[in-house]
Amino acid sequence: MKRLYIYLRFYFVTLLYILLTMLLIVGAYIYSIPSIKLGSHIITNHFYSNLGSIPEWLYIVNYFIFVFVIAIIIIIGWTIRYSVRKKRNSAADIIFQEKYIPQLFEYLFSEHEYSEEQKKNKLNELNAEITSDYLRWTLVNVLREINVQTKGTVNQKTQRLFDTLEMDYLVYSYLKSLHVKDKIFAIKTISIFKLSYYEPQIIKLTKSRNLIIRSESIVAMMHLNAENNPLSFVLSDGYIPTLWDLNLIIKTITELEVKQIDYVGLINSEKEFISLLGIMLARKNNQTQFNQIIAAKLSRPNRMISDEAFLTCVSFAENADDYNELINKYLLASENLKLEIIKCLRYSPDTQSAIKFLKWVVESQKLVQKLEALKSLFELDFNTVVFYKNSEDEYIRKSCLQILDINL
Amino acid sequence: MNTFNWIDIVTSIFFIYGCLLFGSYLLNAVLSLSEFRRYSVKNKYVDYKTMLSFEKIPTVSVIAPAFNEGKSIVESVKCLNSLSYPDYDLIIVNDGSTDDTLKKLIESFNLIESAQAIDTQLHTESIRNVYYSRNPVYSHLTVIDKENGGKADALNAAINVSNKDLFLAIDVDCLLEPDAIERMVKPFIEDRKYEVIAAGGVIRVVNSCNIENGKVTEVKYPKNFWAKFQVLEYFRAFTLGRMAWSKINGLLIISGAFGLFDRNRVINVGGYDRNTVGEDLELVVRLRRYMHEVEKKKYRVAFIPDPLCWTEVPENFNNLFRQRNRWTRGAIDTILKHRKMFLNPKYKLIGLLSFPNWVLFEWLGPIIQFVGLLYFIFLAIFGAVDYKIFITLLIFVFTFSLMYSLFAIFFEIYTFNKYKGSGFFFQSVLVIILEMFIYQPLNMIFSLSGHLDYYFKRKTHKVWGKMERVGFH
């Protein structure tokens, strides 16, 4: 029943459009004939009698005026209806804030332990008062926010409270809803309260064309599988992430402090963004043991992958030989990557090799790279920067002064 | 050919033009509704805060040229410094101001002069000094002090100094929402099919709003009638017009007050044109030409309908006149410069639809309106007006305009609802009615003066087109 209501609500606007278009067409037809016969009734078009006294095109213009007037009335009606509905919802929000939030906080955050009887009574009170879907929706949202932001007892209490409230029918119907807002509500709830029996539906949604549904589903999948290879769905057939997804996956992996990652599977994936994800995760988690696999990606035609692999190899480099090999390939890198490499060298374990390389950049490369190299040298070897202050090359001298002015 | 035939032919031309105009407005409304629905489904529930911890997102320079902005410069910089984007810097260009703009900046942000090595990829007037702040709160701030060269020249100077992937060109007196950059950058990292080369955003009117610490804290409907007219005009232009063109990837203009661009591509096309006053329109047209002629890749100019940028609009006749005159000159200049694109299938939709739309309705529109008015007076004098037809057509125009503007207002209430209270709606209805009889005819005159200035005075170069600012309250 609830799903039927949701479907009707979703298609209401579309149905209205179809109805209005049909009315326009039927209206135009009725307007163009002198009378219409409905059974035994004959409806006469009184406007038609004017047609003799005005040109036909003007007759059509009159019809448009009629349509515009109707449209004006509809727009005004919609605006008033919408404003009233907004006011009603904000009034419900105020009641929720003033009445239920204090009670909820009192229950969740008080150190006093309620007896089972008291808990049952409180729950009955809450269930009796929260009758509309809008209030239930708001309550679950609040519980979810508290759950995300807390740990320990309060976190467990929100989980228990959610389970006791028996909101499963609401989550299910909203997950099936066509409204994005409803779907997101359901996915977030599944994700935070770990309702793992929804996993098959969530996997389907990770391939959704809608970015926000896809993002929320990715996060939900990782939450549901936080303990057991949360990136397995990434390697499944048909999943093609965007740069947005990739960022989101890395963010969630970091938040969940995931340890179990199939780096080799990710890095060697044929799908470009998945391979990129593997390399980025390896660099972020300092997985130097995959250096050789990553080095093999330096020749990938996709610039993003080869750049990321290059950067990762630079950050994994340990000795002068590694650096020499990379310097040989430096000139092949894109302009942005060159800057990234220079920045990366600030954290190099082999300081001497890094300084030597940076000096080469200052003396022989483009102005933008000189500037970035001097910034890195400022961190690694202040004396070299001071030395360049008196350089004969005007650009090096100016760059050097700029770095010193800002930082000293 | 007798006189009456001649009159019939001219009348028919005006009638066809009118039909095309109203048809394009109707199409705009339908397309914008569809585009907004698509945008809303895709973005309404996105939590932009997640972007703050993203690892791989484009870096951004916010660049703002300033000329005699002493009244509001400090508030503006404070606002621009408090944006939430993780990797951005702020470059203010003092374009040879003759007031205390630079002095205020130096004092308020503890600026120090610094040597600066600049990779001059775009030619500009000479740079006097570059300043950085000693205050760590403003560590992302760079102030360039340069010889006066006009807005485009100042923007080019900032592009030279920037070393980020994208740049957000704004008017320094604009106030941005804290998450403005995230929302503008999103299309650049989410699109799989197209390369996004630029993104434009909506400009909102800040007059009469409450502002605290460089942020709009309460949105109020302007008290001044000129500003009220412009609120309505901006609703129509941004939510209905540009949204519709964005739907079919035919957007030709990104407002100079708020637009995000791919820096490398802008450098490749030679930066902003310093010899026009319509540098914003001209740059987008040139970028599009470049994509068609040189890169030949699938690309897109995105449009973000969220209200992210607030600006002060002219509150008196003279300022409004100067602004519109400048806009018209800019449009004519760009149209003539890129006339090769007109109905040229090589440029696909841009050449066949967007550009002709600008030629027909933006360039020729005011002229045709004016000639139509003269023609009507001529017919009236010679008793050749059929008043029954005239009144019917007048009612047609009136009801259509009312419907179109009401739709724009409804759109605002339904989507962003920034103006609270029922008073806004009823005041808007009054403004719509007055606008038809006061503001629109005046706008036609402003545009005509722009045409005259362009053809006879050749006023196109290096003019800032300043308006006197009241400053933020």
Image (cartoon, coloured by chain):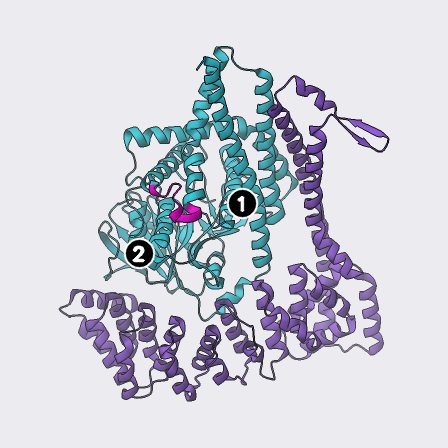
Image point 28% across, 30% down: which residue?
A: B457
Residue behind mark 1: B239
Q: Helix, strand, or loop for circle 2?
A: helix
Residue B220 pos. (x, y %): 56, 43
* Chain containing the residue with disc 1: B
Image point 70% across, 75% down: which residue?
A: A195
Letter of the chain in purple? A
Q: How far apart are the two marked residues, 2 and 1, measured between alpha carbons? A: 30 Å
Residue B267: numbered disc: 2
> Which of the image's four quarters has the N terminus of chain B?
top left
Q: Where does the magenta region start and end? A: B340-350
* Chain containing the residue with disc 2: B
Image point 31% across, 53% down: which residue?
A: B269
**Nearest the camera: B56 or B427?**
B56
A279 displayed left or right of A381: right
Is residue A145 found inside the magenta-colored segment of the image?
no
The colour applied to the residues of chain B in this rendering is: cyan
